[in-house]
Amino acid sequence: MTTTAIQSAYTLLNESIMYYEGRPVGTVAALDPTGPAAKNYEECFVRDFVISALVFLNKGEPEIVRNFLETVLQIRTQERAMTGHEIQPGVMPASFRVVADAHGNESLLADFGERAIGRVAPVDSMMWWVILLDTYVRVTGDEELAERRDFQRAIHQILQLCLRDTFEVFPALLVPDGAFLIDRRMGVYGHPLEIQSLFYGMLQAAQDLLRPTPENVKLVKMAIKRKQALRTYVRIFYWLDLARLNEIHRFGTEEFGAGSVNMLNIYPQSIPGWVEHWLPERGGYFVGNLGPGRMDFRFFALGNLLAILFGLATGDQTDDVMALYESRWADLIGNMPVKLCYPALEGIEWELLTGSDPKNVPWSYHNGGNWPCLLWTFVAAAIKGQRHELAHKAFERACAQLPGDSWPEYYDGRTGRLIGRRANLNQTWSAAALIFADQLLQDEKGLAMFPREPGP
């Protein structure tokens, strides 16, 4: 069964390869025979391709990854404007496509958010680009590419943009709703965990990649300082287990001065009723969001799993996240790995926070849907946490169903038993995630591909 599933996944991945001027430069998002639900699924998304890139690198086929990195940078250096304003240096496109004129001449058309639903520019694309570049160099040893002047300038600009001074006093990065994987209104505005985990990984990758030139030395020092502050901040303030829940439950409020315990003025009354009953005796997780007077207690898979993978989580926190998965398997893994977030927004909360989004109805799409593309992050985190049995269990579940269901983009329902109501079939990153998970299970040395630093 496993062999058949992997072969089917490879067939889809190879058929999805996008070519520009005869060179492979990426993979399209989906090859749905019924036609994609959205036209941009015929494009190559930066965040989507990262999973395909990991597969190609692990197979010893780095050419397409190098071409992708160069192509995205080429697009970025072209003159682009969005809603009448120049795009900030460092911002990378969400996606791109190859278009041909009547004479067959090819060109690249990118989306920096000006064609996206809600017209929100992506924040995660530039972070994934730096992380993938670092991974490419780690695997291939091709330091010459990263040392090129245009690549060094791009890394510098991305770092400058992310480290820009603001009126915030927190080390976490402030981003708007819909600016990353969850690209629709979900009440994740502010400081979502996913971005903090990516930010941390990107800071480490940029530190590894930038040459020690005079203009970079100061910036790298800022990045190291910010990374250390972010790591401490997330590990303490974003972390939730039963002991921490008891602390929040007994918080005093309106505290003033340096001796404040409840520094962010979180009101105990804001703790949702489900948390007390759902959180097991042993286990914990990083909450989805944090800010003044605001704690989003929802569990977001990608942020937690990347925190483990990039070393943002401690060893004990890694153990507790894995223990939570084991205790709440039906909720967080279910019939199809992996649940994107838990629980779903329902009722008046869904109406107010999503704007009654018909695609994000409860337990569907980004509002509690199950996403096969997250399988690789779960398998990687489980292996790193020495929970190989959990990794195999999730992988085997996906192998048993994904090929027969024609590789859906996502699944619906509390446990992910239903193929997504508006999901594309033959979704490339669903197939690529299964392949890379298999590669990691065959040889866990693949974990060394990712930017992280050893820590307690």
Image (cartoon, rainbow, N blue to C red):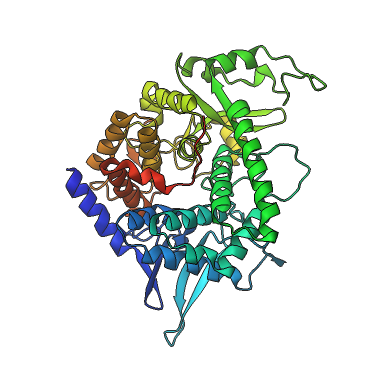
Q: Is residue 363 left or right of residue 234?
A: left
Q: Nearer the viewer, residue 224 or 168?
A: 224
- Judged from this view, the residue extending furthest toward the bottom is 103
Residue at 63 percent across and 70 percent down: it is 80
Residue at 32 percent across and 62 percent down: it is 61
Quadrant assignment, res 238 = top right
Compared to 115, does 326 lie above or below? Answer: above
Quadrant assignment, res 217 = bottom right
* Position of the N terminus by quadrant: top left
Can I make out residue 165 in this image? yes
Residue 38 on image: x %, y %: 45, 58
Compared to 287, does 51 lie above or below? Answer: below
Count up the numbered dots.
Answer: 0
Residue at 63 percent across and 37 percent down: it is 228
Residue 20 on image: x %, y %: 41, 74
Q: Is residue 292 left or right of residue 187?
A: right
Q: Nearer the viewer, residue 384 or 285?
A: 384
Residue 453 on image: x %, y %: 51, 40
Q: Is residue 310 left or right of residue 51?
A: right
Residue 334 on image: x %, y %: 35, 31
Q: Nearer the viewer, residue 388 or 79?
A: 388
Can I make out residue 184 in this image? no
